[in-house]
């Protein structure tokens, strides 16, 4: 009760503002990998996410149900991505189609180099980012954890940088926290940890490192119980955010008693 | 006349517009976007755009992803 | 909202029962290290803890305010400890005095070997545990992360085992998760992670490893903002508990796409 | 007569009971427990226990800890 | 060449003395797990080990070849162990039989608690150590990584302490370097890392943490090429020992150029 | 003795060939950071390095002694670098001057983005690499640990890729072994770990991950005893190389006895 | 007469000494040690020790291990 | 006539060649390389290259590094 109150208190100190828009949650949910719309809907509810990613694919008359209806019903903002694109050209056109189809100029920019690592191609990514910014898009690039590339993406006008913790879907967590700290340390835009998170403690760590938000997909949609994991992640993001603000104790080599040393009885 | 629709060959009558083509395949075109030979075609112009032999039409929509 | 609902739903699947008593929270708060009673009170509220530890010390006429009054006001159960004791003899007598003073036969048993590491002395600890169990106490021993010692403490009749993550007050987190997994894997009583936690992700990890609860002191009371960290820890414990139940995705060496591979347009 | 009270030498009158001693030092004895020479003395017996020369009295209470 | 020279130079600064005996190598080899005597012999040569462990088992007329002959041929000291013993009583009797059979009062004391973890039983281990010391043995106890138990074993008169890095045969390396550092920091006898090493870098790390030697078995005898791994381990022990003595650079959060900053041309 | 023999045996299985040239050591030494030429000379001897890096700077009449003389005396190959360059243009011109001055078309290509991280700028680095390859250089690029950038550098015609373990001079070791494994897994040219190594076990790990060689500077030249650390690193590289080839045991969750279970006496 | 030798029942003639028993099973007894009912029997005494009905004899030697 | 030599203004006589300049500052020019206004000047051409007013000359050599 009062803890909830507190929690809101602290969060509200600094609302999460992205491209000038305030979002009510620092958890962004990817909808891919879920076995059904029903599962997406439950995970969405449990996660309290305010924005979800979607992919752009050829219309398929056979498919029933529309992901957009699910998002609308929940009042969740849609963030189209360019998943599957290998070149700046493909990504730019996919972004243009997404804007046309969904009426949003926000785009999660993905330009990957291969299927095995799904790692971003730094050159194509930068080219696409520059072109999309010039075309009036609000660009949220999925990038590796290189602080220099993150800096260049900001210089190109991206409204956020979304470094990976580890490759998409691996659940390896944050492989290199030092890089994330370096990125956060100099970022002038929100840093959103994207990809690699496997469980709640990974998400909490991302926030403790200073990330403004996390983007989750497989860790939630492919968990044995997606809704339960979504709820776990919602708590983890709050936990990590609060801990970052609370100022953790320094690490010590030797122990320090938490009970008073004086006043011991002789027994 | 033959065009390519989402990667598949597709025979249509001469003079077919993009709008007609799309209506034929879906009651609602909500959340759709179309490109002809890679160029985005804004929805307002769909009914003006008459398809031509050999053109590649791509029509996309949002699906679960990312 | 619905996430809170969910969260309770999942937690309620298995209430936290210790020595036959159901506790409403899996976070146990140590009250040592806080600069004032006021801070303890705020941290207590934010943590939603249902039980707090206290130490037994010589009465000091100069001290104003009584920790027991704070706990009573919050309706929090008191768990006396034997902090500072170096021998089974001291610990047993301290436990007897605690029972006499506080009217509870629950005791957090601490028998440490030295001031620099504050690590438990396995031999004295086992002796004290056996003696206290025989004397009718509900014994919660603070132990190292040795699975064999944890097993022996259970065989001695302890109602829980409380392995450390790392030495008291170091904030080094869980140094050896493998040992905690081994302890949890065979434990017939609740495993409560005690000592070493530095921040929220550590607490979440403890729960993900299968601990039934965590005991926190320095990480909260010595944080720059104890109440905020207490709220963070409350979320972290829920996060880790839910994640454990949700069934995380396995770790993979290679990436796995979360967006569909089929249906890509040619652009 | 001299006893040791919580580690300090303390002169009291002959015949002083544990109860009297404790009352002298605190209005409320809530949450107190006492031991004489290391043996716990249950509260109900405090008024019966007459202190003797050289005994070591320890009186403890709960404080922030652990 | 000159590096070899150097290497001896540094090693010779402090020869490895155990129970008053100087050993020419800081690598102790366990002979268990090898598919044949031939493999043991090759690994022994490649490892340059000066001492090997053997187990005591019922004589078996069917077995051909004698491990003692192999060790004699190589001029390697034998260190019998009490592997498989579960109680102090068994371990003490096994040690007495080993002394009778092999004419050495050195004993690697193992008293394990179960087959799944093969972790030492702290209570039985301490009892056995005390009894064997009293009986005139030079006791080298296989222990867990608890600094307090290590201290007690030294107080009991053991001539070395042999903490594990991780459970026997797991190859998980040194799970808790902090504990090894604590043990080394206060040890008055040689600390020998025993069990858990999987590969060369683990052995190097053990020496960098300040261990006086390492005891290897599975990592060598069960490697795909035991002789090659034995050679690797010999180099790793020298590497770690030299690095410990050389004084490593401190870890830094930010980079530091290794090329001069001044004198840059304008091009 | 025979271990040395063995060691050469195994190493000789595959000599270290770089740009068609066989080098007698897999340790490349950076000469920066050393307090004096004397120290460089001793470290060089102890390291047994067959190639050393040098930086190109404005001639300074005041300086006495020439690093080239030291390298010549030791018969060590010189590898000029472009340290300090921020743009492809600067790097290319520095490489041309190095070729002119030293008569070698080998160049360690460094194009860093800033002084605080000294991390490579991926875009400038790729441009410079392509230009230098076209100009007939044998390009060895210092890169981050991004597998995609490493791939692109190979496609550009580089004769090796030199990913960092962590930023230059930090001694943080190999922050992201997973990335190094990915790079090694697909590399068609030698992978040389460059930067971040702090001590011997880091160098051994680099080789165990499959790197063909390591490049060391600060870890040796700034150690308290550079010559001793150089000797340590020489052993570590051999250790890691041999271990890689020997086929380490798999990691196991549970223990596995190295002494036989059968044949136990009843005592 | 029956004894237990290394865990197995074993019939031997009355008056058999430990020495005789061991010789019967191995040309060389190098690196052997023996215990009867858990008590170590020093080698010099083997020839003096006459085995008795029901005794448990354990004879150990060094094998690859640890 | 004034040129810039390794970043510093430097007055030289008209007609000075790169070779002369370098000899003036070092007995041996071993391991040197020179650039004028950013362009590398191969050693064989040093004696032919006459320096001109305002040119920036950079002369580099190998130092401990990397």
Image: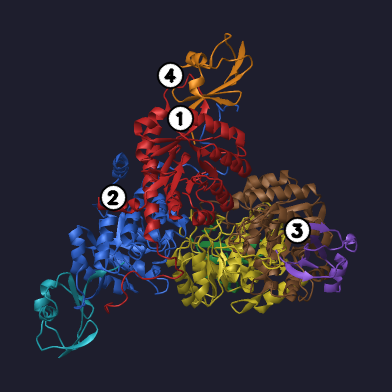
Chain colours: A yellow, B green, C brown, D purple, E red, F blue, G orange, H cyan
Give the x, y percent position of residue A263: 71, 67
- To which residue does mark 1 refer? E102
The residue singled out by tag 4 in the image is G28
- Disc 2 to disc 3, how far (Cα)? 60 Å
Q: How far apart are the two marked residues, 4 and 2, measured between alpha carbons? A: 43 Å
Q: Residue at x 13, y 80 (%)?
A: H18
Give the image quarter of residue E130: top right
Dot 2: element: helix
Question: Which SS class for mark 4?
Answer: loop
Image vertical order of residue E135 relative to residue B18, above or below = above
Distance (Cα) linking label 3 and label 4: 63 Å
Q: Which chain is indicated by disc 1?
A: E
Q: How crowded is mark 2: few (under 14 residues within 10 Å), some or many (20 or more)?
A: some
Residue at which label 3 appears:
C94
Residue C227 placement: quadrant: bottom right
Q: Which of F27 and F70 is in front in this view?
A: F70
Other-residue count near label 3 (Cα within 10 Å), few / some / many at <14 / 14–19 / ≥20: many
Q: In this view, does B56 lie to the left or right of C110?
A: left
G51 relative to F35 in the view: left or right: right
Chain identity of mark 4: G
The chain to which mark 2 is attached is: E
Q: Which of marks 4 and 2 is in front?
A: 4
Viewer-proximal residue among H50 and G29 = G29
Q: Are marks 2 and 3 in contact (CB under 8 Å)?
A: no
Specify few, some or many for label 1: CA neighbours under 10 Å numbering under 14, 14-19, or 20 or more: many
Which type of secondary structure does the marked residue at label 3 adopt? helix
Disc 3 sits on a residue from what chain? C
Which residue does the numbered mark 2 point to in the structure image? E4
- Image position, residue H5 (x, y; %): 20, 83
Q: How far, Cα to Cα, is label 1 from label 3?
A: 51 Å
Q: Residue at x 28, y 60 (%)?
A: F43
């Amino acid at each position: 009760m009062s803890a909830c109150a507190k929690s809101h208190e602290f969060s509200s100190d600094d609302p999460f503002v992205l491209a000038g828009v305030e979002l009510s949650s620092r958890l962004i949910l990817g909808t891919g990998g879920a076995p059904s719309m029903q599962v997406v809907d439950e995970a969405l509810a449990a996660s309290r996410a305010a924005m979800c990613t979607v992919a752009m694919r050829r219309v398929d008359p056979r498919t029933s149900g529309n992901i957009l209806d699910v998002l609308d019903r929940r009042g969740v903002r849609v963030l189209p991505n360019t998943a599957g694109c290998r070149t700046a050209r493909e990504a730019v056109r996919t972004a243009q189609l997404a804007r046309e189809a969904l009426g949003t100029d926000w785009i999660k920019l993905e330009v990957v180099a291969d299927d095995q690592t799904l790692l971003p191609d730094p050159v194509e990514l930068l080219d696409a980012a520059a072109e999309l910014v010039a075309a009036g898009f609000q660009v949220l690039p999925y990038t590796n954890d290189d602080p220099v590339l993150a800096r260049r993406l900001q210089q190109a006008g991206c409204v956020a940088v979304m470094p990976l913790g580890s490759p998409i879907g691996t659940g390896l967590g944050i492989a290199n926290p030092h890089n994330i700290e370096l990125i956060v340390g100099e970022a002038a835009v929100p840093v959103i940890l994207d990809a690699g998170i496997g469980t709640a403690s990974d998400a909490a760590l991302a926030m403790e490192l200073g990330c403004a938000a996390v983007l989750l997909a497989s860790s939630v949609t492919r968990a044995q119980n997606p809704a339960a994991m979504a709820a776990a992640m919602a708590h983890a993001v709050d936990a990590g955010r609060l801990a970052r603000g609370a100022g953790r104790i320094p690490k010590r080599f030797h122990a320090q008693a938490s009970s008073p040393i004086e006043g011991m009885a002789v027994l | 006349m033959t065009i390519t629709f989402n990667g598949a060959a597709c025979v249509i009558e001469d003079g077919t517009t993009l709008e007609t083509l799309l209506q034929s395949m879906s009651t609602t075109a909500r959340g759709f976007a179309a490109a002809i030979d890679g160029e985005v075609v804004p929805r307002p112009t769909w009914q003006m755009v008459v398809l031509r032999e050999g053109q590649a039409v791509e029509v996309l929509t949002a699906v679960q992803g990312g």
